[in-house]
Image: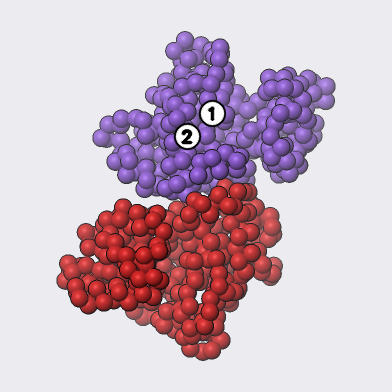
Chain colours: A purple, B red
């Protein structure tokens, strides 16, 4: 992957992002008999890893594009990442959300200075409208995972992990569109290290595994998962291309497993993670790992859950 | 403080403790105009910094004492720290709690393998009984803050902070019996670094400040605070001696300020902290710091709050 340079990206991002904590969680080490660490991207700026890719995108924009501004469709972590990235770089950022988007997410995007447009009844309609606005106004449309700069930014997670914990044997990552997993795989290749990298999808939204099985980018006919952050019907084409080349082990987890991990982390370790954030740990707890895997890092994607949903976990 | 060696203690503790995360929290940096980091001892083993001192105590026990076992009176973080320390070292540990101690805390101490004794209607009665049992059985009675090994263990927090963030200008610490503050002050002296260290007490339990004002260890006639982790009527004598020698700036915070910080950290940063854990941040938010203080670390003592209390914050 010659056009990726995760090391240079990590250096470029360093003044902007939080080097998030990597912390051993006893409750998980006990249950698995491994040393289990969590990479807490839940403590990243905007509360999710997506800020890495979004900020890298903002830093890669040419002057003319930056002056015209960017647009994206997202009521989730990518939208927040772009909003903050725009604020930090002084780049006008428009975020299109479906009219049903939660008020708290609307407020947070506006709080980061983004222009908020409410349009359409679902994500697809919002996305189409965002692309229409991009054409009309000359904005650059920014995809949420299917882009070199986004993948590169997410890959910097790997560099932070191995710098702090060089003895790591395995990194477990949640997979939605495949931005984080593709980035981790490239970063590992560029590091020359031998670390197993595993991707985990909810059983009801395993579009990357469907694509890998079919040998081409595949759209799920239906999708059913509580993990909205990784609920992606069609994985990114670039992401698929990268992941299929490396062909990493892929696991699936149930919604019950995800909820159980959210509860476990809250009650035993006082950690708040979003549903997508629990996916990697749910995968680990369901896995049967060989003895030679001693030290495992699960990436926690974020902490952006509604407080009402938090209350349900107590 | 010739009989303290924080550097050696940090090395001794390293295989046993978690090097807890030091993470910048945007919501606090924005509010103060400083770079604000939290030292998350809430992610320490047992969920609180107290494990450092307790483990250091366990490691300092002679063979004969270790064989006879230890006893302490505590339904809080110190009791959990001693319980886990006993388990890890194979030392019999008895924890005396008043009969009113919350069931969850009883279960957690037993879960770490401690022998649980329920006796007395309040902490004082439990403590007297623990000392009686110590004499009868030859157990070593372990105080929760007034001891060289305990203070030394807590002081290792300072070493971790300055190693990771050498540019830190100020460290803000909660004060109960004074173990953490005394340890930090000694660690700073031994490091030779110029870092301001500030202690914070709840206004309704400011026994260290009362003692400093009186020039001698002083018992508060009454005490009123929601921050049970720092609700101490009489500070430790050794702790007082050390703190009065260094005479650091001391702040006070209200229960309202503590609750507001608990809510802020939960809602904006998805961080769970106990009431005592919010004390340092509450102090910072109420302070008016000079411009030359640019980088501040607040120590979060722990995350051991009942989930029922967490629900109230949502």
Residue, far right: A136
Which residue occupies 63% across, 28% down? A144
Circle 1 — which element?
loop
Left or right: B35 in relation to B70? right
Q: Is residue A254 above or below residue B106?
A: above
Instruction: Give percent across and percent down for residue A93.
Output: 75, 35
| Res A36 quadrant in image | top left
Left or right: A54 in relation to B10? right
- Say yes or no: labels 1 and 2 on the same chain: yes
Q: Quadrant of the N terminus of chain B?
A: bottom left
Labelled disc at residue A52? none
Instruction: Give percent across and percent down for residue B272.
Output: 53, 52
Determine whether label 1 and label 2 are within 8 Å by CB: yes
Instruction: Give percent across and percent down for residue B314.
Output: 60, 48
Which residue occupies 46% across, 85% down? B217
Instruction: Give percent across and percent down for residue A276.
Output: 52, 33
Residue at the disc numbered 1: A226
Mark 1 belongs to which subunit? Answer: A
Q: Earlier in the sequence, mark 1 or mark 2?
A: 1
Which residue occupies 38% across, 33% down? A284
């Amino acid at each position: 992957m010659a056009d990726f340079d995760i090391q240079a990206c990590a250096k470029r991002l360093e003044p902007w992002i939080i080097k998030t904590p990597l912390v051993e969680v006893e409750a998980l080490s006990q249950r698995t008999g491994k040393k289990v660490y969590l990479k807490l991207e839940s403590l990243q700026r905007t509360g999710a890893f997506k800020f890495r890719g979004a900020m890298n995108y903002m830093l890669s924009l040419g002057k003319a594009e930056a002056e015209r501004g960017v647009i994206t469709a997202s009521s989730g972590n990518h939208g927040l990442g772009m909003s903050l990235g725009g604020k930090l770089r002084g780049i006008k950022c428009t975020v299109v959300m479906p009219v049903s988007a939660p008020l708290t997410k609307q407020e947070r995007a506006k709080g980061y200075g983004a222009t908020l447009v409410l349009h359409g009844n679902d994500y697809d309609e919002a996305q189409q409208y965002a692309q229409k606005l991009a054409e009309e106004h000359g904005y650059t449309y920014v995809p949420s995972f299917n882009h070199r700069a986004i993948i590169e930014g997410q890959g910097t997670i790997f560099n932070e992990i191995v710098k702090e914990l060089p003895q790591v044997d395995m990194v477990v990552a949640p997979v939605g569109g495949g931005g984080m997993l593709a980035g981790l795989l490239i970063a590992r290749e560029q590091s020359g290290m031998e670390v197993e990298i595993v991707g985990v999808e909810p059983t009801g939204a395993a579009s990357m595994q469907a694509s890998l099985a079919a040998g081409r980018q595949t759209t799920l006919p239906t999708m059913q998962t509580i993990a909205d952050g990784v609920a992606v019907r069609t994985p990114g084409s670039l992401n698929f291309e990268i992941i299929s080349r490396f062909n990493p082990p892929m696991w699936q987890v149930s919604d019950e497993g995800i909820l159980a991990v959210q509860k476990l982390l809250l009650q035993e370790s006082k950690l708040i993670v979003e549903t997508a954030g629990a996916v990697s740990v749910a995968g680990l707890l369901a896995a049967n790992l060989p003895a030679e895997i001693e030290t495992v890092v699960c990436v926690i994607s974020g902490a952006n859950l509604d407080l009402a949903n938090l209350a349900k976990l107590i």
